[in-house]
Image (spheres, rainbow, N blue to C red):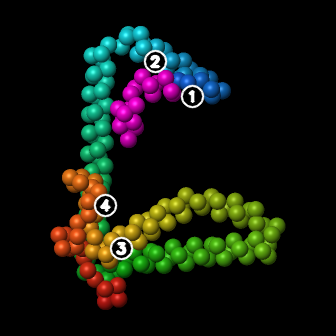
């Protein structure tokens, strides 16, 4: 992702922007980095770095982007493979895992919110401690609720019979109907 940003903006512009931003930070390491980046920016501007060297830099950035793209493709294919295995499983628990996870998250979230409301109303002197403790749980909740959101979104697609093309298909913005790529059809109560 950073490599595509470099390719779009251009390294000289990015170096100049970073040098300018770092120069305003009151830290010796940031000041040193700003000075080094300023020198690099001047080298770009004065032609000390040749066009051939810039071309080699761009080739290297393209190669790194291809490697990152391949890594993302492998990661997405593994996620898709595990979702397909879940849907195709004959084990009722595997098929019910998403709703079970949803109920657990919802009940835990509800219990936490009721506890917070109780503390705020009846134990006001302890409210700041409890709110601080709940704030520290933010990352855990972000992960759990993100997973739940993906589960709900995927199940909604399954129920509608829509299979979205992946990022690596020719036109990722088009949808396939269920006649072209049948989505697994099952009743939520007949597992």
| Residue 183 falls in image quadrant | bottom left
Disc on the earlier residue, 3 or 2: 2
Neighbour class for label 2 at 10 Å: few (<14), some, many (≥20)?
many
Front residue of 12/91: it is: 12
Q: Are marks 3 and 2 in contact (CB under 8 Å)?
A: no
Disc on the earlier residue, 1 or 3: 1
Rendered location of residue 35, percent (x, y):
54, 18
Q: Which residues are magenta?
A: 1-18
**Circle 3 residue:** 155
Q: Residue 68 got which mark?
A: none
| Mark 4 vs mark 3: in front | 3
Which residue lies most toward the front here? 174
| Residue 56 falls in image quadrant | top left
- 184 part of magenta stretch: no
Residue 129 visible to an observer of this rendering: yes
**Circle 2 residue:** 41
Q: Secondary structure at mark 3?
A: helix
Rendered location of residue 177, percent (x, y):
23, 70
């Amino acid at each position: 992702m950073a490599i595509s940003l470099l390719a779009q903006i251009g390294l000289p512009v990015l170096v100049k922007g970073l040098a300018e931003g770092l120069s305003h930070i009151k830290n010796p390491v940031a000041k040193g980095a700003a000075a080094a980046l300023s020198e690099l920016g001047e080298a770009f501007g004065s032609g000390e770095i040749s066009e051939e060297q810039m071309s080699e830099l761009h080739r290297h950035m393209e190669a790194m982007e291809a490697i990152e793209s391949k890594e993302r493709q492998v990661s997405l294919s593994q996620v898709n493979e595990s979702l397909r295995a879940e849907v195709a499983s004959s084990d009722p628990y595997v098929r019910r895992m998403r709703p079970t996870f949803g109920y657990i998250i919802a009940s835990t979230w509800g219990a936490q919110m009721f506890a917070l409301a109780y503390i705020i109303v009846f134990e006001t002197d302890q409210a700041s401690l409890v709110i601080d403790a709940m704030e520290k749980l933010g990352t855990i909740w972000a992960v759990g609720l993100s997973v739940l959101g993906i589960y709900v979104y995927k199940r909604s697609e399954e129920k509608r019979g829509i299979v979205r093309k992946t990022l690596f298909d020719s036109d990722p913005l088009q949808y396939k109907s269920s006649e072209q790529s049948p989505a697994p059809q099952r009743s939520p109560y007949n597992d």
